[in-house]
Amino acid sequence: MDYYPVKPKEKFSQSMAFKGIIIVILTLLMLIPGAMIRSLIRERQERSEESISLINAKWSKAQSVIGPVLSIPYTTTEKDDNNRLRTYHRVLNIVPAELDVKARLFPEERHYGIYKTILYKSEQVFVGSFDKVVLSQLPPNNSYNLAAASIRIGLSDLRGVADNVSFDMGGRKFTAEPAGNSDNFLGEVLVINLRDAGLLTSDDRLPFSFNLDLKGSSSISYLPVARTTSVEIEGAWQNPGFTGTYTPDYTLDDNSFDAKWKILSFNRPISEYWTDDDISSYWDCYFGVNLVSPVDHYQQNMRSAKYMFMFIALTFVAMFFVEVLTRRRVHPLQYILVGIALTLFYSLLLSISEQLGFALAYLIASAATVGLIAAYMGSVFKGRTPTLILALILALLYLYLYAILQLEDSALLAGSIGLFVILALIMFVSRKVNWYHQSDPADPAAAPQVE
């Protein structure tokens, strides 16, 4: 009897199982450059924020407006820790009964090298009223000096005041001046000295109005100190972000927005009066508009970098199956080179997006990466079909990633469905692979033949 020669047993180091283990190890090693890429993105983002701060410092910071509030000095006698009577000089701050603000913003972009920020000029009109000051309704046992009363307006940055502020109260005009010192609650202060006790007690209501031409950067916000506060902000900006606790009624079109807020006394936990700066900051009560940039390429770069491990793993899996199906062995070093090329995609994407924007940078970086890997693996596989298959898989992966990056609320759903489909394709392709190189007993051609 003649027997066909038995194929010698394959060494484990040459088996597909061993190659699979090596690929898993290489994929995990690629986490190291992935962490370096994310660190680079954070570093460039911090550099961008520093550059933007330099631009803003020469213009004006983001503005927060508080007030106006009526400030009345008074003296009070209290016992100190040694039970001795002492006289203290304090200031009572009273909020308006009503305040109506109409603001129009004129945003513009400013550049510092490759970085840009959003600055604005604004024209604001404040109209409101204070209740008549009735001494019997104020906290008792104090001596109030109505002749030294003043109106104070808090701002984040007085450098943003672009014109003199003329304050009209009770038919009289007053000029606002810088206070010279900051208040822990109001911030930097414009002060209007009234110097008239009779003005505060003559009428049932003390109407006031003033215009405020204010420069700022990135955002503007207000604190609803009045018992009833109405604010309307409009501006020529197509991507406003409405910040704070209170949601406005707003309208948007292609190039402008209009937002309106109305906050009542029981909508905000702010006292109607307080002494000195003995009041909470109430940061959670601010509201306003953030002039966000339409494209934050650093955020998109960071989101794309989070998918790096998945990209490298799926590319290695695709290479492995092409290797199995074509029976062309790929050396582990060649896997490493492909992994480095996939990693450099994110470096290319970051550097080009700083110059040209994210969408165009993604197209250039992905096309360059797919072309490089396809050209390199074409010389390994020695065939057009497997090379085109690998290039098509990479192109679809990059297209899939870009689609996920454009989604926000449904990104998780799209990612989960996509990964499920990819896993199903891998299982379908691998179902007929003879992982152990064993003959199928049901296949007569594969069985040993005996004469």
Image (cartoon, rainbow, N blue to C red):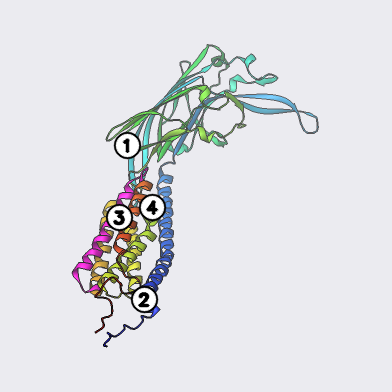
The residue most toward the bottom is 1
Q: Position of residue 145 (x, y in %)?
A: 63, 21
Closer to the chain start, of discs 1 and 3, is 1
Q: Decide: marks 4, 3 in contact (CB < 8 A)? A: no
Q: Which residue is mark 3?
A: 355
Amino acid type for the residue under numbered disc 1: Trp
Q: Is residue 109 left or right of residue 165?
A: left
Q: Where's residue 220, x and y in %?
A: 42, 35
Does 93 lie within the magenta span? no
Contact check, label 1 and label 2, Cβ < 8 Å: no
Classify 10 Å Cα crowding around label 1: few (below 14), some (14-19), many (20 and above): many
Magenta range:
381-410
In the image, residue 388 lies in the stretch drawn in magenta: yes
- Residue identified by numbered label 1: 237
Q: Nearer the viewer, residue 340 or 189?
A: 340
Query: Tag 3 or tag 2, which sits nearer the N-term?
Result: 2
Q: Which residue is mark 2?
A: 15
Give the CA separation, mark 2 to mark 3. 47 Å
Residue at image location 38% in from the left, 57% down from the top? 305
